[in-house]
Image (spheres, rainbow, N blue to C red):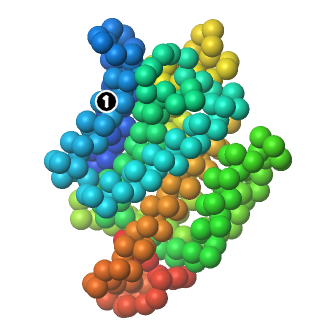
Amino acid sequence: MRAVKQLLLFGWEQAWSCLFPVVIFASLAITKWVPMPFLPRYDWLLIICLFMQWWMVRAGLETRDELKVISLFHVIGLALELFKVHMGSWSYPEEGYSKVFGVPLYSGFMYASVASYLCQAWRRLKVELVRWPSSWLVVPLASAIYLNFFTHHYWMDIRWWLSGLVILVFWKAWVRYEVNGTRYRMPLALSFVLIGFFIWVAENIATYFSAWEYPNQAEAWSLVHLGKVSSWLLLVIVSFLIVATLKRVKKGSDESRSFRGEESSPKVQGRFGSGKLYS
């Protein structure tokens, strides 16, 4: 019974962490089936996302530092959307005043909602990273993964090579989290896979509600190819690495910064690197 209780509490914390994505899904569903007055659907979605973001900061559900991270993801996601739509990877067929080069501005919030989830879950579950690799490995790897989303249209797709590098770089890395006062841990690479899979599930829901449209969905909705999990997996890794790196920078600027070794006592102080963790 304790295991069931812990699982339910974990699910509850995850649900609260997904508040922003849930609002986006609900908005997609409502605006698809309920005619919206005065403005096209895409513009209403942008207004709803902007209001939701304002309310979450106003209500204290997100901090100003988290808002900065989420805004960064909005820009990164919007840049990717502009390129992918231009290349014909997917499209936004409906009309809207807030569309730029065929991309509605609300689309950036779908990427920002992933960052919102990561920030919320990080705080609610008191996440700590164990044996986080050096920034000299993390930053180039994240950059290469993001750039591959662009360059594979003109050059070879190296996502599987990058996936192999992710396994090598994070082979010894773990994520620790807390549920109801009890600490748990799992391999960091496994957490990447799980988040990527559930985003793929969310993608199917989003395309069903016409958030965007793949070429094979032009006539009728169909399940998004399972191969897209690899794309989301890599995007989750980029998201996670950015959030983790920014948290490291934030901790480095705090006077009360502390680092603990996995094998040593929790009070042991140490430099950021192999065998150390940070929250």
Instruction: Give above or below for 263 relative to 194.
Output: below
Left or right, 145 with respect to 260, comes to: right
The secondary element bearing badge 1 is classed as helix
Q: Which residue is mark 1?
A: 47
- Residue located 63% across and 30% down the image: 85
Q: Position of residue 23 (x, y in %)?
A: 31, 32
Q: How many marks?
A: 1
Across and down, in percent, residue 77 comes to: 52, 44
Q: Where is residue 196, by image quadrant?
A: top right
Task: State the image quarter where residue 154 is shown.
Answer: top right
List the single residue furthest toward the left: 59
Please identify the quarter of the rendering in which residue 152 is found.
top right
Q: Is residue 169 left or right of residue 11?
A: right
Q: Quadrant of the C terminus?
A: bottom left
Residue 47 in picture, x, y percent from top left: 31, 30
Please name the residue shown 57% across and 37% down the image. Answer: 81
User: In this orientation, does residue 94 appear?
Assistant: yes
Q: Amino acid at mark 1?
A: Ile
Using the image, determine if residue 82 lies above or below residue 120: above
In this rendering, would 107 be left or right of 159? left
Q: Position of residue 201 (x, y in %)?
A: 51, 33
Q: Residue at left 32%, top 54%? A: 67
- Circle 1 Cα neighbour tier, 10 Å, few/some/many (<14 / 14–19 / ≥20): few
In this rendered view, identify the residue nearer to me: 53 or 195.
Answer: 53
171 relative to 74, above or below: below
